[in-house]
Amino acid sequence: MTWELLSIFGTIAFAVSGAIIAMEEDYDILGILVLALATSFGGGMVRNLLIGIPIENIWDQGLLFKLAIIAVIIVFILPQHWIFYWEKPGLFFDAIGLSAFAVQGALAAVEAGYSPIAVVVAATLTGCGGGIIRDILAGRKPLVFRTDIYAIWATLGGTVIALGWLNIEWEKYVLTALLVI
Amino acid sequence: MTWELLSIFGTIAFAVSGAIIAMEEDYDILGILVLALATSFGGGMVRNLLIGIPIENIWDQGLLFKLAIIAVIIVFILPQHWIFYWEKPGLFFDAIGLSAFAVQGALAAVEAGYSPIAVVVAATLTGCGGGIIRDILAGRKPLVFRTDIYAIWATLGGTVIALGWLNIEWEKYVLTALLVI
Amino acid sequence: MTWELLSIFGTIAFAVSGAIIAMEEDYDILGILVLALATSFGGGMVRNLLIGIPIENIWDQGLLFKLAIIAVIIVFILPQHWIFYWEKPGLFFDAIGLSAFAVQGALAAVEAGYSPIAVVVAATLTGCGGGIIRDILAGRKPLVFRTDIYAIWATLGGTVIALGWLNIEWEKYVLTALLVI
């Protein structure tokens, strides 16, 4: 339940970050929607592809899709200067999204019976993949490779959880706390 | 039949646009071929991937492949200044390709029994995906996100048709007309 | 056996080239790892995708993964100026990797029973795909489209071998020789 909630926060945060970057690039509404959805669901798609889950499974996440689209519409309607207020909580939500997705990716790879290396890669790509695709579509260098040192923590955290070395409920909060610091 | 023909026009137009952009970037013959084929078939590949059609099905389109490659060779052989004459009819063919591909993508998603959101995404990506991949491979920002307002019409048109709200034959011409205006 | 060895050389060379480019872009360790692995395994992933081999098969290459990661760690630890010594042998290894991968891609497509066009595309993408993904992730224009005239030879060589027009053992050395010149 709390887990579900983190996923929802993460999806919305990623959709908003995609929409904001698209607006910074003066993209039209099509570009805004594509970047927002690519950021939210790109990581999951790459993960599904790599660990052999049918990629069309992403369509089962109907609720997350609707929330992401609603979030984009709100960002699009809001006056531009509101975006500045987003920056601080945005980083916070982004961190939640990244770690929630990394854990999900790692768990999916563990369930599918992959080796530890594959688990780490799946965690990394599920967490960071959406942001990488977003930056490439915006014609930028992927931000996550340059400044987001917390991406490594999210990845490691995801792997640690997935390999069962720690209790999920407990680690989750520690991880989020670590990220926000 | 008319439908088939639009597909052929679209494939050739996309291949030519990919080849021209590769030449503008001073790419060699390998780059020209890859960009041309990526523009023509990239959208369909992304669509197949997203809606769970085996992606290797694209190889069944042998005729379209041959036509695309022949188009590239003709563009490569023609003297450079001929490219300027292409610009006007090029936009026209591009529009036909984009709308024909959007309708195809939407129909494929409807046939596979997906939700309306998935249908819209499939229409968008089949129509615009090739151009997006082309621009990324050329190191440019995707053009379709910035100026091609008609991309939205193509997407909407594709969805409308696919959801069966309009008669295909009738809408097709209206859509093409709309795009060219 | 010799074949296996070429594959190993190629994987390591590609991993090192990805790591070096990531370091030139001031990427952090996450970026270095992602670029190195994307260069080594990206081409194979795209090939698997296009010719309908389950993409998760790449995880079977456990030895190659480990070697690539060890190569990255060595590059990361070595003092920066050592990188300059890599350039000359690097091109040589790169050429081996490209041609070994092109041949592999072509053989995989032939085994799966595809048409000659598909074989050429599979050879091209397996050989060049990793480098293209690397350059896009680094925010650069794909190098292989611009200067590496030898990429075409690798592709053609791969196709020729795969279609059985030449004896593999014999051609392999000629091809490598050609590339290095």
Image: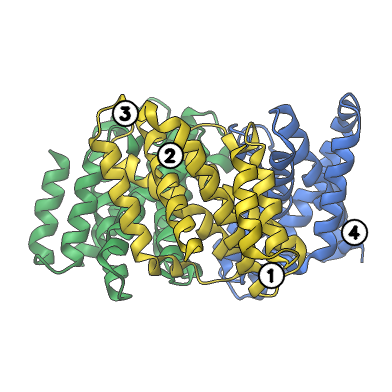
Chain colours: A yellow, B green, C blue
Identify the residue under disc 4. C5
Disc 3/disc 2 C-alpha distance (Å)? 13 Å
Q: Tell which tag, 4 or 3, sits nearer the viewer.
A: 3
Identify the residue under disc 2. A17
Near mark 4 (Cα within 10 A), the count class, few <14, some 14-19 or many ≥20, is: few
Disc 4/disc 2 C-alpha distance (Å)? 45 Å
Which chain letter goes with mark 2? A
Disc 4/disc 1 C-alpha distance (Å)? 20 Å
Three-letter amino acid code at disc 4?
Leu
Where residue C57 is drawn, which disc sits there? 1
Q: What is the x, y in percent for residue A58?
A: 44, 65
Where residue B123 is drawn, which disc sits there? none
Near mark 3 (Cα within 10 A), the count class, few <14, some 14-19 or many ≥20, is: few
Disc 2/disc 1 C-alpha distance (Å)? 33 Å
Q: Are marks 3 and 1 in contact (CB under 8 Å)?
A: no
- A107 relative position to C84: left or right: left
Is label 3 on the same chain as label 1? no
Q: How many marks?
A: 4
Disc 4/disc 3 C-alpha distance (Å)? 58 Å
Three-letter amino acid code at disc 1?
Asn
**Nearest to N terminus: mark 3 or mark 2:** 2
Three-letter amino acid code at disc 3?
Trp
Identify the residue under disc 3. A82
Q: Tell which tag, 2 or 1, sits nearer the viewer.
A: 2
From this view, report whether residue B134 is shown above or below residue B174. above
Q: What is the x, y in percent for residue B105?
A: 31, 62
Q: Secondary structure at mark 2?
A: helix
Q: Secondary structure at mark 1?
A: helix
